[in-house]
Image (tube, helix red, strand yellow):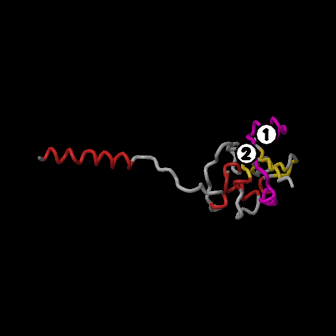
Amino acid sequence: MLNNAKMSWLPLSLLLVSTACAPVRPSGRWPSPADVESTKVEPARGDRNLITTTEILPAMRSAYDVVKLRRPGWLVSHGMYARMDGTIQGPIVYLDGVRYGNCEELKTIDAFAVGEVRYLNGLDATTKFGPGHGTGAILVSLRRR
């Protein structure tokens, strides 16, 4: 009798274990970038060296905010070095292909004017723009009207 009682619980316990370990599909729609808090940094999808307009949220005021919240590692690039005057050189910023300045200059670019932001590592930036880009480059492209 005891053996039969244990056997009757076996199918039920297997059913519970299998459903508890089953993957769960999300219901409804995936949240859009507008639904996400501006301070929440989501993992990059696709190209980690690219920020597109879909990642720019209303709370982000400048291109600096966009980079700081979405790819903060770009602002503290590996390979930063001190200049002869003791200042730290970070990536060089280009706006629509024209040299714009250092990372602080990103604060002067309105986030809603930005079409995309791309990061080039030191090797790629030096190949494209020449010597002096060992810390990389941040390329900002404005939206076309």
Number of numbered discs overlaid on the protein picture = 2
Q: In which quadrant of the rendered image does the C terminus lie?
A: bottom right
Please provide percent x and percent y for residue 8: 21, 47
**Image coords of residue 82 (percent x, y):** 74, 47
Give the secondary structure at mark 1: helix
Q: Of the numbered discs in the image, which one, if any, rests on residue 125? A: 1
The residue at the point 76 percent across, 57 percent down is 63
Vertical position of residue 61 compared to residue 79: above or below: below
User: Which amino acid type corresponds to the residue marked 2 in the rendered image?
Assistant: Tyr
Label 2: few (<14), some (14–19) or many (≥20) C-alpha neighbours in 10 Å: some
Task: Give the mark nearer the N terminus: 2 vs 1.
Answer: 2
Mark 2 residue element: strand
Q: Position of residue 59 (x, y in %)?
A: 70, 64
Residue pictured at 83% horizontal, 48% vertical? 94
Tell me how far mark 2 sits from mark 1, CA to CA. Answer: 16 Å
In this rendering, position of residue 16 left or right of residue 67? left
Which range of residues does the magenta coloring cover? 105-133
Q: Residue 144: x and y, percent?
A: 85, 52
Which quadrant of the figure has residue 131? Answer: top right
Q: Classify residue 121 by image quadrant.
A: top right
Q: Is residue 67 magenta?
A: no
Question: Which residue is rendered at x = 69% and y = 54% of the image?
Answer: 55
Cβ–Cβ under 8 Å for marks 2 and 1: no
Reply above or below: 145 against 22: below
- Residue at image x 88%, y 47%? 98
**Residue 135: image tag:** none
User: Which one is nearer the viewer's eye here, 105 or 96?
Assistant: 96
* Residue assigned mark 2: 81
Q: Is residue 131 magenta?
A: yes
